[in-house]
Image (cartoon, rainbow, N blue to C red):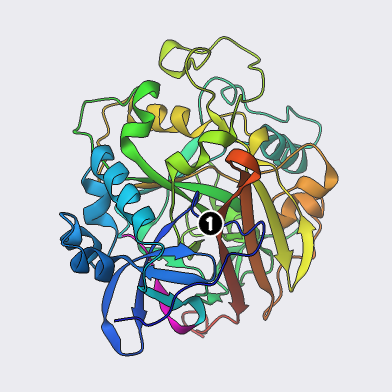
Amino acid sequence: MPQHHPRDLAEGDPFGPDTLPYGVFTTPDAPARPRVGVRYGAHVLDAAAAAAAHGSAYADLLAAPTLNPLMAAGRPVWEAVRAEVRGWLDEPYFHPLEEVTLHLPFEVADYVDFYASEHHAANVGRIFRPGGEALTPNWKHLPIGYHGRAGTVVVTGTDVVRPQGQRKAPGDELPTFGPSLRLDIEAEVGFVVGTPAPASTPVPLSDFREHVFGVCLVNDWSSRDLQAWEYVPLGPFLGKSFATSVSAWITPLDAFDAARTAPPARTYPLLPYLDDSAGEPGGIDLRIEVRINGEVVSRPPFSAMYWTAAQQLAHMTVNGASLRTGDFYASGTVSGPEPDQLGCLLELTGGKGPFLADGDEVTLTAWAPGANGARIGLGEVTGRIVPARTAPPGS
């Protein structure tokens, strides 16, 4: 049993009693026993040990090697477990954060990536379609997205191997094969589905809270040269599927109640299944910070996103697609209207680069305002670029 107890939290610590994100960890004395932990300051509460000691009805859920059983249990259980966790914060079931190993917190079922920032979409449109319309005709009528690759979602701290593939510069007659020369970041926010929904049962905006368990930061690494050559006429494929980094901590959706905010004004009336003019505000006031090799390069505001997470979930299921526990969807690159609020290097450099070099390390952090001046934290996402590992086929 852990013998540590966290000291008083530093003032402004974003991982206080109003945050309490869930993750999965192991300790040196039990490396083959991943279980659920809760971050509290610079410590990890061993929720499995605390639940067992107290005879909690949810002990089996917290002893599981992923968050999926807890997520599948549904909102009443989420609320009950969160209440019990708060009661264990004064007890000796803690490990220092630096002494544990953190793992991918949930088993990813399906992965969908959206394109929900008007500023990002317009900036990219101007780069790729100079002289044309910045936004495609459908952009303000539906949340555009694509199905990504669930098998290459990785936890923070995992090295990102530079991808290889076909690329063709505008002046080249034929494509070439090799390591990506325009490797980029995408600062995003992800939403993790807990309660499933059967096929042919669209999820309305009003049911968003019943299905989404929590929120995390995402870096959807992107190879701009592979992407530019492959994505016409279909969507992203190899330029995106090599790695998507997520936080080791999933912050419960309810932790952001004080940060809910109205999204930007809509340009056109929305179809009824997307109309969020009534009900709670759909936006979240998250303040993201992007660092490359320790230097802050951007501070994208999530509050500026045109499409909300509830609208994305509604659109994702309106055709009858089912939801599974562990389904995961991301916002798309978060960008604001100012030059220091852009969420990818493509925008920050006007498409000219430089892009990521081998050895570069990218870190995303974020927080949201909580009640009574508290800060609500999202676990960081860090990844380091390492060189491509294999020679081109046939070489």
Q: Residue at x 51, y 35 (%)?
A: 257
Front residue of 128/345: it is: 345
Residue occupied by mark 1 = 16
Q: Give the amino acid type for the residue marked by disc 1 in the picture.
A: Gly
State which quarter of the image contains the N terminus.
bottom left
Q: Residue at x 45, y 30 (%)?
A: 310
Q: Which secondary structure lies at badge 1? A: loop
Residue 313: percent from left, percent from top: 40, 32
Residue 269 sits in quarter: top right
Furthest-bottom residue in this view: 29
Q: Residue at x 70, y 59 (%)?
A: 290
Report whether 228 appears left or right of 80. Answer: right
Residue 44 sits in quarter: bottom left
Front residue of 56/114: it is: 56
Residue 104 among those drawn in magenta = yes
What are the residue bounds of the magenta stretch? 99-106
Residue 282: percent from left, percent from top: 52, 27
Q: Please state the total of marks drawn on the protein image.
A: 1
Residue 251: percent from left, percent from top: 46, 51
Q: Is residue 215 positioned above or below 314 on the image? A: below
Residue 30 among those drawn in magenta = no
Front residue of 118/395: it is: 118
